[in-house]
Structures are given as C-alpha cells and as structure tokens.
Amino acid sequence: MNIKSEKTQSLNKKTAALCVFVFENSKGPLGLPKLPAKLESAVNQSVKETQGKFESISIIHTHQLIAAEKIVIVGLGKKPKTTTDSIRMVAGKIAQKIRELKLVDFTIIVPEDLQFNINQTVSAIVEGAEMSMYSFDKYKKEKNEGKVPNLVLVSSHKIDDVVLRAKKTAESVNYTRDIANLPPNECSPAQLAGLAKLLASRNNLKCTILSKGELRQKGFGGISAVGQGSKNEPKLIILEYRRGKRQDKPVVVVGKAVTFDTGGISIKPSEKMDEMKFDKCGGCTVLGIMKAASDLRLPVNLVGIIPSVENMPSGESYRPGDIVRLFGGKTAEILNTDAEGRVILADALAYGVKIYRPSEIIDFATLTGACIVALGANVAGLVSNNKRITEKLKSASARTSEQIWQLPIDDDFMDMIKSDVADIKNIGVGRAAGTITAAAFLANAVGNTPWAHFDIAGTAWIQTGSKPKSYNPKGATGFGVRLILDYLSN
Ligand code: BES
Ligand code: MN
Ligand code: ZN
C-alpha cells in the first residue's frame, strides 16, 4: 500500500474519500474543519444515525462542496473504551471498505486529543490499513480482492518518520504471513532455508544454513532426531544483522519452524491436522523480525536462529523411549514424539547461547495446545527467567496490542521434567501445566542467560471459530513481529 502524510488543509484535499473518526454519542467527527452548511447538516444527520458505534461506517457525497468526493465517517465506539487497538481495527475496516468500493485513494484525518500520543495513533492507523489489505491468494486464479488503494494521512504534525516506520513494520508482518501461510508441500525445511537466503541477499544479512550431516556432526541431537523421520531433511537457519556498536552483545531471536507436525510416531488425530502447516510460524516470525530490523536499519546487533524440521512417522522416525543427546551435552528421554518443538528449540537455544553470548535470547514457538486452553486465541504465553526483559516486553505488548500473559516457572516445574533414565524428559506429568513444563525443557538450554519464551500456539494464526480482526484476516497473523520491533526500538 502506498501511504504518505501531508499537512494539507483537509477540505482542500483532492481525494476520493475524506475519512474521519467519531466517538459514540459525541458532538461530531474528530478534526473535521467547519463545513459548508449543507454538508454539515448531512454529517450531523449521519452521526445521529450511526451514533459513532464501533466500526460503523457512513458515506456522504459532497457534491463538490469541498475538494473530496465523499466524506466517510467511522465510529470508534465509547471514548473511555478506545485504545490504540480500536484505532487499528477501525483503520483496517476503512481500508477494506474503500477497496470494496473500488476507490483508488483515501485520506484519513489523524485525530488528536486522544488518551495516547499522536505517534501511537499514527502507527495504529498505518498498521491497521496495511495489515488489513493482506490476503493469501498465491494459489488462486481469481484473486480475493480488488486493487489496494493509496492512503494519505493529514495532520498538522510532522509524522512522516512514524508513518514510514509503521509501514515497514506492517509490511514485514505481511511478509511473515506470506511464508507462514505456505502449504507444507511447498515449504519444506530446505525451501524455508531458500526463502531465508533470499531475504539475506536482499537485505544484506549474513546467512548460514546447517544441513543434516553438519547437524549430526556438530552435536545437534535434538534437531537430527526429530528430523530423521522425513525425507525432507532438517535445516538450521542462521541470520545475522549487525548495526549496533561493535562490542555490544547481540539479541538472539529463535523460532520453531516445524514445516508440518503430524506428531510423528505419537501421531495426532486427523481432525484439523492440516492446521499443523502453521507449526512453522515461530520461525516465520523470526524471518519477519530480521526483515523489519534491517529494512529500518535499527542500530542493534541481532541474530535469528530457526531450527526447521518436518515431524513425520516412518521407519526412520525417532521413537518414544529414545534418548537423544541435545546440543551442549544434556540427554533427553523422548516419551512423546509429538512434543517435538521443545526438542529442536533446546538445540537452537543452546547453540545461540554458546556461539553468540547474547545479552538476551527470545524465542517464539507454537509449542503447546495447553497454551490455548489456558489463555485462548488472543493472548500468547510468556515464560522468562529475567524480570528486566519481562517488564520491557510487557510495555512493548501494551504499546503494540500484541497481548501476552506471563506464566510462572520455578524448581517445582523443573522437577516435573526430570527423567529416570536421562537428564530430562520431553513431557511433564499428565496434563498439569503443559505450557510451563514445555518451557522448563527450554530453560535447561539457556542457563543464566536472560531469556523470554513466547508460546504462540493460540495467536500465530486465526483459529477456526475465533473472530478475526479487520487487520488480522484468516490464516497466519505474523504475531510477534510488531512486539519485538517495538522492544528493539525502545
Ligand atoms: N505444535 C504442537 C502444539 C500445538 C497444537 C499448537 C495445537 C497449536 C495448536 C506441538 O508440537 C504439540 O504437539 N504439543 C503437544 C505436547 C504434548 C504431547 C505434551 C500438545 O500440545 O498436545
Ligand atoms: Mn507436536
Ligand atoms: Zn509442533
């Protein structure tokens, strides 16, 4: 989407649609200058009808009384309930309406005097518009929607930097979605590695891919074991971006990329198994973070690590009962081959800690169904060993509306994954605290390095039956990209 900002007087703006926000039961639209009398009464009439209800839209023809062809009035709902996320959702609704009407462009008057600052409002509008235009139609002859309209934001403030930043971030979210939505027959670990290489060459990142032989030889017993059941061989993808101070330790981001999770020998039931194509979403989020950070030339050192496998049942598969040696030397007893994410992540995390000595290591994984049971489909689970980064991540979450909720971890949970025959085992005790016992397995790999783990099982894609937001259409959401970009920028 083409997005820019202007300081133009909004009534002189030549545009197909001049869009303004209005609160529920308020006097009138926010930031709309005094209109010619005829138009003003039409606007008042229409505000009366919709009452500014959340996501309501009414359209008024201007009959050339001002430069715009139409005025579009959009409801924000009640003022005290308005958040940056309502702005984001409503902006997405507007963009979708404009596209549906086949208009080539639209203009939004940026509202001021809200409960949050203008930069947050602008970011929310830009993100909402850009992300709501997303649809995955790569495999359809008849494309889903019409042409994407151009957007102009009118404000008396200088907002072009914020607009550009939000636009690039939202584009990276859409890039994440494009890869995450790929079907499993078109996105093997090798194909995912190919996409990472393409990103690296475009954005000037260092890219290293470790293949089956090297993984075995270098001691990645977890990735090797989970990957051995598929003829699509496992890969470890490493991307490096350096624009921070030379001596600054990097931030390492790790993402689970199981390109398809059948469960392996502990096979899953067939119902909704197709959704396990989304089990690569954590890895895709890491790709999106690497893209956004480099597009925006953030002054940070950043490393992305993506362990990628296909979890399949076959004569070569790893089995319940196997004991594997993880990177770094700890042994793990496999009691369920469907708890594969933690096994490949433990290798990747231990590698990240050992090779890069990071200031902090943050991972994203569609790790446990238990996380959906605990937190539903709109909130990601957070488990961490460090107060400082937890607080920073919570602030980033509040600003970006990518919701997270912290779960505890202590020695009682670590005890739940002790094995009789190996150092640890890959499942806990019964159904108790499934998300935390999975995280406890990962905690074994990071030692004292500040670490945060996000379980995005519920949030990585729109679950069947749950309600999509305008800016999160069906399929993969790209959850985590905006959160970490905000975190790295603050
Ligand atoms: N990828 C799944 C978790 C998952 C399930 C994410 C459904 C999103 C929706 C993971 O590999 C898995 O299978 N976890 C098991 C762990 C169990 C065997 C301890 C689970 O959650 O059932
Ligand atoms: Mn699994
Ligand atoms: Zn999985």
Image (cartoon, helix red, strand yellow):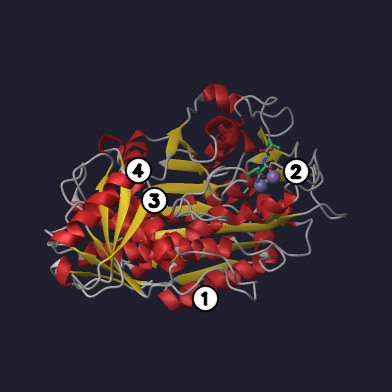
- The residue at which mark 4 appears reads as 53
Q: Is mark 2 within 8 Å of ligand 2?
A: yes
Amino acid on which disc 3 is placed: Met
Crowding at dot 4, Cα within 10 Å, few <14 / some 14-19 / many 20+, comes out as some
Q: Nearer the viewer, mark 3 or mark 1?
A: 3
- Under circle 1, the secondary element is helix
User: What's under tag 4, amino acid-wise?
Assistant: Lys
- The earlier-in-sequence mark between 4 and 1 is 4
Residue at 18% in and 44% down: 27
Near-viewer residue (121 or 427) = 121
Question: Mark 2 sits on what residue?
Answer: 337
Q: Tags 4 and 2 in contact by the CB under 8 Å rule?
A: no
Residue on which disc 1 sits: 198
- Residue, disc 3: 89
Q: Amino acid at mark 2?
A: Thr
Residue 319 is drawn in which quadrant?
A: top right
Q: Quadrant of ligand 1?
A: top right
Q: Could you tell me if the residues under marks 3 and 1 are in contact, i.e. CB atoms within 8 Å? A: no
The Cα atoms of the two marked residues, 3 and 4, are separated by 13 Å
Nearest-to-viewer mark from 4 and 2: 4
